[in-house]
Image (cartoon, rainbow, N blue to C red):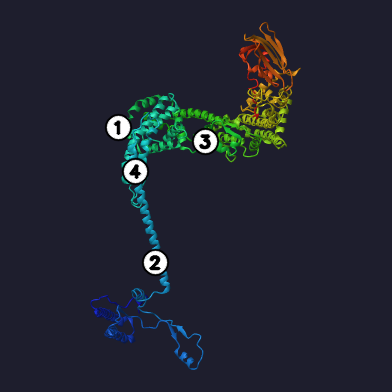
């Protein structure tokens, strides 16, 4: 009995395609049949004995004989089929034998025949499946021969659809892969081609740049040479990082071009760039104070720049970045270019290594630096051990720790609404001045190794006994405590309350202090967090507490905490009384309500002015005064911050009052001045229109428009020295005060308490030219007659008449009888001043001056006497008066 695998195999022969011999199939069929029969005959003895029972042996023998005889029958049948029609001869591909047993359904033929004869309906189940049907030699035949033969069996619709879909998918994916690969090759080809072009272009650019001239101490003069050659070096990217053969899809050319161009670039860095930087550092080294930390820092950078054995690229880059930033402030691109060249030089050059290999060029370039660096090493070697270790500790902390503590960021967004930094750099506290130091006990002495290398000290000086290390630790601790307290005090002192521009800004700032983000409390809390030792938890036993108290880091923090106890003590709560800061908040809340009442009044400016007057006139104690008094009893820096808040609050209240005054100033003072006085005579000497005396009187007289405004509004500010705030900023413009002083001179000159508007002076004729026999001066009806001879002093007043048509005239009469007199005249209320000012002043003395008039070829001179302090003819008395439109 055959197993399943044997039943699924093929039984038959496939003929070869032989176009030359059409009957070759006969031999192949005969060969198959003989082989088959040989297999049957070989297997028959065993099957006779073991495979079948006695009744089947005869049938088995007969089967083999039948198969033997079947060969000739099949051969004859195939010949009849093939050669029956010469025009339509089929192709013979093989002969295959399969099972003769029925596979499928069984029919009940008797029942079907009876149903058809008697016209009965069909059965419910006319057929049923055969339960023991087994196909032989069929499964593999269809899969491997019949269906595999081209055009032998037609494809079904589902197979065709699936096949087309697979073919389309495969074709699409293949096309995309081909396009992607072609695009990638094209891209990387173009990329490398463009990189090659870039190398050639930068090389030509490099060759066209002449060597730089001048004294180069920062390396910037080398940039025209370095930039193109660096661009050429990196045109293909950093070939050091691209080691794979498949880089750029195997088209990468940088590994061939890069080393060649890089050699030129490194030579420029070694021969030009680094020596120029070293020369600049050498100049700084020579200028640095002897034995200073600055000098040690410069020497450290120089040693690391020329020796790669213990080079710290980050430290060198940080120092040079700061140096370039100071030299080329605002030139960010230039600084970035210098830094990129420095980074490449630090990563790929070793000046010291070349000198050790007896490179003559390296030795020659370093020769100018040998003597100065040795002298600096000898000088700095005199530093004490503790100073060197402490400097190294700070250096290591700067290089390894995270970003420093920035008080602006720590306080939060409300910082700018309340504080302003006097020095931005002091807002930054290095992480070294936190709890970093106390974790370095075992590393303090190890940090001397770097500076020992910098100073070229023998190794044996780095080996210290336990006693030496203990002394170093104590001395460094003293340095650290002093540095720590100095930095944090400077940081707190650097925080100042900002100047408020107006009342709403002051109110908003105080709200932030008492109920918002509380920046003042936040600043003090940051100070407390960084100066307070850790609290001893209640879960610790007495032994554990004693062990903690005995630790050096706890003792150090406890010592620092005592130094800042007054500053941080305001945060400590004392039972029901609360903390000192809470008491400050209560006063600030009262100040907030005080300012809010002014702002919410119908006219805030009037309310502010009333508050200022109450405080100045009646010495009233208000919320601002109470905060100022409280600030005097607070510790630093809280007393300064609270006092500044009160001062700023007082300042914005005064500013609000001045703004209110400015409205009144424009409506009552400036408007009258611009309407009746500005641009007219005597304020404008060239004007033809005069200022009416009534308006002049109304504006300048005692208790007039200007004087009344000053006494009622500005006088409290001026007499109490409040024209300038405590911060030095002006509340009332200086030119306003200057013009008020000029107005006061005008008032005292032209007004008297008894007679009001008017001024007196005396005039005396001095001389008259010979071609004139008489001079007659008429000043508002006041006559001064003069002929050659003795003169008299005449006492005159101005104004002598309030009439608008008043005339002042000077008439000179000629000595010839047939000649007519000639005159110089002016009309109007200011005619006297116009006439006198038209003459030429001479012989000016305190209290008197001469004025000479020229009329019709003759001249007459008068001497005018007046009070020196109240001179109505003083130059610039009116022309200097220019009333500003604003008060602040």
> Looking at the rendered structure, which numbered label has been put on residue 377?
none
Real-space CA distance between mark 2 and mark 3, rounded to the nearest whole angstrom:
71 Å
In which quarter of the view is residue 338 placed? top left
Which residue is denoted by mark 1 in the rendering?
A: 361
Frontmost of labels 4 and 3 is 4
Q: Residue at x 38, y 33 (%)?
A: 221
Frontmost of labels 3 and 1 is 1
Real-space CA distance between mark 2 and mark 4, rounded to the nearest whole angstrom:
47 Å
In which quarter of the view is residue 584 placed? top right
Judged from the image, the secondary structure of the residue bearing numbered disc 2 is helix
Give whichever of 58, 314 is nearer the camera. Answer: 314
Give whichever of 491, 58 is nearer the camera. Answer: 491
- Mark 4 is surrounded, within 10 Å at the Cα level, by few (under 14), some (14 to 19) or many (20 or more) other residues, namely many
Image position of 498 (left or right of 40): right
* Mark sitting earlier along the chain (3/1): 1
Query: Could you tell me residue 799's position as x and y percent?
Result: 72, 18
Frontmost of labels 2 and 4 is 4
Real-space CA distance between mark 1 and mark 4, rounded to the nearest whole angstrom:
27 Å
Judged from the image, the secondary structure of the residue bearing numbered disc 3 is loop
Judged from the image, the secondary structure of the residue bearing numbered disc 4 is helix
Which residue is denoted by mark 2 in the rendering?
A: 167
Image position of 320 (left or right of 259): right
Query: Could you tell me residue 548's position as x and y percent?
Result: 54, 36
Total marks placed = 4
Which residue is denoted by mark 4 in the rendering?
A: 199
* Mark sitting earlier along the chain (1/4): 4
Q: Are marks 3 and 1 in contact (CB under 8 Å)?
A: no
Q: Are marks 2 and 3 in contact (CB under 8 Å)?
A: no
> Looking at the rendered structure, which numbered label has been put on residue 435?
3
């Amino acid at each position: 009995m055959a197993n399943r695998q044997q039943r699924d195999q093929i039984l038959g022969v496939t003929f070869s395609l032989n176009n030359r011999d059409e009957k070759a199939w006969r031999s192949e069929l005969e060969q198959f049949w003989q082989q088959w029969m040989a297999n049957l005959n070989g297997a028959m003895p065993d099957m006779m004995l073991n495979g079948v029972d006695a009744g089947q042996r005869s049938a088995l023998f007969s089967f083999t004989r039948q198969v033997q005889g079947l060969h000739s029958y099949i051969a004859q049948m195939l010949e009849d089929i093939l050669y029956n029609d010469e025009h339509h001869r089929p192709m013979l591909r093989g002969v295959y034998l399969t099972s003769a047993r029925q596979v499928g359904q069984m029919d009940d033929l008797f029942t079907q025949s009876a149903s058809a004869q008697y016209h009965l309906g069909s059965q419910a189940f006319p057929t049923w499946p055969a339960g023991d049907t087994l196909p032989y030699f069929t499964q593999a035949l269809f899969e491997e021969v019949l269906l595999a033969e081209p055009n032998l069996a037609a494809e079904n619709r589902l197979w065709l659809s699936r096949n087309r879909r697979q073919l389309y998918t495969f074709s699409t994916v293949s096309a995309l892969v081909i396009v992607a690969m072609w695009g990638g090759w094209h891209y990387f080809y173009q990329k490398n081609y463009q990189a090659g072009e870039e190398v050639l272009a930068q090389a030509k650019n490099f060759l066209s740049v002449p060597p730089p001239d001048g004294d180069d101490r920062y390396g910037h003069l080398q940039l025209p040479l370095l930039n193109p050659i660096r661009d050429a070096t990196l045109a293909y990217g950093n070939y050091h990082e691209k080691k794979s053969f498949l880089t750029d899809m195997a088209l990468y050319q940088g590994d061939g071009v890069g080393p060649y161009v890089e050699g030129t670039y490194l030579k420029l860095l070694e021969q030009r760039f680094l020596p120029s930087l070293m020369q600049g550092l050498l100049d700084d080294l020579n200028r640095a104070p002897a034995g200073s930390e600055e000098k040690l820092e410069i020497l450290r950078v120089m040693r690391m720049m020329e020796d790669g054995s213990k080079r710290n690229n980050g430290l060198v880059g940080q120092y040079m970045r700061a140096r370039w930033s100071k030299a080329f402030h605002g030139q960010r691109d230039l600084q970035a270019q210098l830094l990129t060249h420095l980074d490449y030089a630090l990563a790929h050059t070793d000046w010291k290594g070349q000198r050790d290999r007896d490179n003559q060029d390296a030795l020659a370039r370093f020769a100018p630096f040998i003597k100065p660096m040795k002298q600096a090493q000898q000088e700095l070697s005199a530093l004490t051990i503790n100073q060197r270790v402490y400097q190294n500790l700070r250096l290591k902390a700067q290089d390894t720790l995270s970003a420093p503590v920035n008080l602006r960021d720590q306080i939060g967004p409300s910082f700018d609404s309340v504080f302003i930094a006097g020095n931005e750099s002091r807002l930054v506290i290095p992480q070294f001045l936190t709890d970093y130091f106390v974790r370095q006990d075992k590393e303090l002495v190890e940090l001397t190794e770097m500076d020992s290398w910098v100073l070229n000290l023998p190794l044996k000086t780095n080996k210290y006994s336990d006693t030496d290390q203990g002394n170093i630790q104590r001395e460094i601790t003293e340095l650290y405590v002093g540095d720590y307290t100095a930095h944090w005090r400077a940081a707190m002192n650097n925080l100042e309350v900002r100047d408020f521009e107006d009342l709403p800004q002051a109110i908003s700032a105080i709200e932030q202090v008492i109920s918002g983000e509380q920046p003042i409390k936040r600043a003090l809390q940051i100070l407390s967090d960084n100066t307070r030792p850790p609290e001893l938890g209640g879960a610790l036993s007495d032994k554990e507490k004693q062990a903690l108290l005995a630790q050096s880091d706890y003792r150090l923090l406890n010592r620092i905490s005592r130094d800042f106890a007054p500053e941080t003590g305001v945060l400590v709560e004392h039972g029901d009384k609360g903390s000192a800061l809470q008491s400050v908040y209560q006063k600030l809340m009262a100040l907030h309500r005080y300012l809010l009442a002014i702002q919410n009044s119908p006219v805030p400016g009037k309310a502010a002015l009333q508050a200022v007057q109450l405080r100045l006139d009646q010495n009233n104690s208000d919320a601002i005064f109470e905060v100022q008094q409280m600030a005097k009893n607070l510790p630093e820096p809280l007393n300064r911050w609270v006092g500044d808040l009160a001062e700023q609050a007082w300042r914005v209240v005064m500013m609000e009052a001045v703004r209110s005054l400015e409205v009144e100033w424009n409506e009552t003072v400036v408007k009258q001045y611009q309407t009746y006085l500005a641009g007219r005579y005597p304020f404008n000497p060239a004007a033809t229109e005069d200022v009416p005396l009534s308006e002049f009187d109304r504006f300048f007289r005692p208790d007039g428009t200007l004087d009344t405004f000053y006494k009622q509004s500005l006088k409290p500010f001026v007499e109490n020295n409040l024209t300038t705030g405590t911060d030095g900023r002006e509340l009332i413009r200086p030119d306003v005060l200057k013009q008020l002083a000029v107005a006061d001179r005008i008032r005292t000159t032209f007004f008297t308490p008894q007679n009001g508007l008017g001024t007196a002076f005396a005039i005396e004729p001095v001389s008259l030219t010979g071609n004139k026999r008489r001079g007659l001066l008429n000043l508002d009806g006041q006559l001064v007659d003069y002929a050659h001879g003795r003169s008299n002093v005449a006492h005159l007043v101005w104004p002598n008449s309030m009439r608008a048509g008043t005339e002042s005239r000077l008439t000179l009469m000629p000595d010839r009888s047939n000649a007519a007199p000639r005159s110089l005249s002016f009309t109007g209320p200011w005619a006297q001043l116009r006439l006198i000012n038209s003459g030429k002043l001479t012989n000016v003395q305190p209290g008197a001056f001469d004025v000479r008039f020229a009329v019709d070829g003759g001249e007459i001179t008068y001497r005018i006497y007046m009070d020196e302090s109240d001179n109505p003819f003083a130059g610039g008395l009116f022309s200097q008066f220019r009333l500003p439109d604003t008060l602040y």
